[in-house]
Amino acid sequence: MSSILIRGGTVITADTRYEADLVVEGETIARVERESKADADLIIDAAGKLVLPGAVDPHTHLDSHYEGLTTCDDFHSGTIAAACGGTTCIVDFCIQYRGVELWEALETWQTKLETNPPVIDVGFHMAVSDLSVPNADEDLRRLCEAGVTSFKLFLAYKESIQVDDETMFRVMQAAAEHGALVLIHAENGDAIDVLIRDALATGKTDSAWHARTRPPLTEAEATSRALYLGHVAGAPVYIVHMSCEEALGRLAAARRRGWRAWGETCTQYLYVDETFLDGPRSEAAKFVFTPPPRAQEEQANLWRALENGLLSVVSSDHCPYFLTDKTAGDDFSTIPQGAPGIEERLVLLHDGGVRSGRISMSGLVELVSTNPARLFGLYPRKGTIAVGSDADLVVFDPDRRHVISARNHHSKVDYSLYEGREVVGAPDIVVARGRVIVENGDPVAKPGFGEFVSRDRFSTSAAHDFRSKTSRN
């Protein structure tokens, strides 16, 4: 059994900040000591560095097929990029396409995982689109038993995976019965479909109309509807990629009532606004994702919601397409909707959040590691630094400067939303289950070290067992 001693670093958790040495034996943290005298196979000098629990990204789309195209990162390339950004576990989406049985969808994603082996651990959500297939009710139960303990429902994309209210409610009932968390893509797909047709009929084809046909109120309406139906069904509800004050207000109202409701935003909504959709298709198409980029003032609203704890998680929603695919269509409605970001999440939150004084380092850990681990059945195995937890660790240099660019990132995608942006702070060394997978910022992991991780059923007590520390020093 191999061992590692991480010496002289400042340990940061969602609760605490302290100087300590970490002793790793095998795949777990064995001891947390002051000035440890332990012998180890590998000694890592972390003096002047921060030691964080590995980040957990609960929202990625690797090797996923949407509207005739497949995202360009598979479970090998995507998890290498994640690891280089300090993420040591992801929860990706199995997609149940219409007519496909739920269990068959899971088997398809397990095959994808085996075909392109990951370098970090991977869990799955199930995106449900069709309950008319055989064994649907039984398979929802079996999925939870297999550790797939969250179901996603798309309230948009009418021609492919959008669900109606009856399907949404039935899945929520099943989640309440079997101990699953319900994830909601909250946009009113029916209204948006009409707005898109109206725009195209009047010759409005520019990329900017991607945002104009998906206004904030369509997100707010769907958010409200999902929260109400989730409460009636007795299911916990988690709204993904929240982007605007109108939707945040609906979440805040539900939480004031004591409903089991949580929300996340994504890195891009904190840095990209609707003006990025102006200009030529060759550039603007990079910023077509859903919900769309919003008015610049919404960024302040989102940061405020992170600071006060209304939003619990920042994910990446990594959904990468090659630029040739993004720019091939004739109008805004044909641009593949999704953007990369799996590698940049931690560094951008550090640079724009911690260094700006918006959040603390403990708050950062809470948003990208501890809260997602708690909400998605991974805590305390992941999401914290404690004896017995997986040795998923990031030695982070808070002073290292580098420039984000597609030339030096590790995803297959050929552009970056943040091209040319200089940031301060970056992972130096990343350890996953007791093995160094990133060294001096470069990947050294072998394919297949990561494995499927079965997650616990949703626990209200675990999910509520945190308070926002984002504004603490």
Image: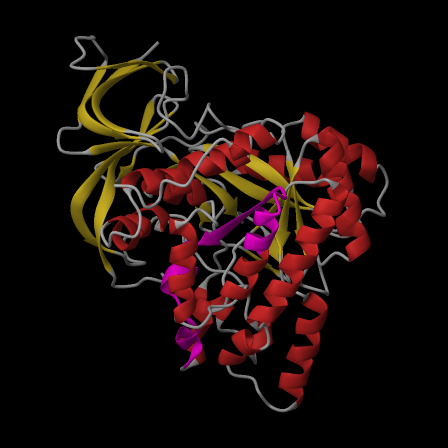
Segment colored magenta: 251-278
Image spot of residue 345 (x, y percent): 37, 49
For this orientation, the residue located farthest to the left is: 48
Q: Nearer the viewer, residue 444 or 418?
A: 418
Does the magenta portion include 268? yes
For this orientation, the residue located farthest to the front is: 257
Say which quarter of the image contains residue 77.
top left
Q: Is residue 172 above or below residue 98?
A: above
Does the rendering let one see residue 319?
A: yes
Is 228 on the left-hand or right-hand side of 359? right
Image spot of residue 133 (x, y percent): 84, 45
Where, quadrant-wise, is the C terminus in this rendering?
Answer: top left
The mark total stands at 0
Write the residue at 71% across / 59% down: 162
Q: Is residue 175 above or below residue 99?
A: above
Q: Nearer the viewer, residue 418 or 48?
A: 48
Image coloring type: secondary structure
Q: Nearer the viewer, residue 423 or 252?
A: 252
Write the residue at 45% across / 78% down: 281
Where, quadrant-wise, is the N terminus in this rendering?
Answer: top left
Write the residue at 47% across / 53% down: 265
Image spot of residue 292 (x, y percent): 51, 68
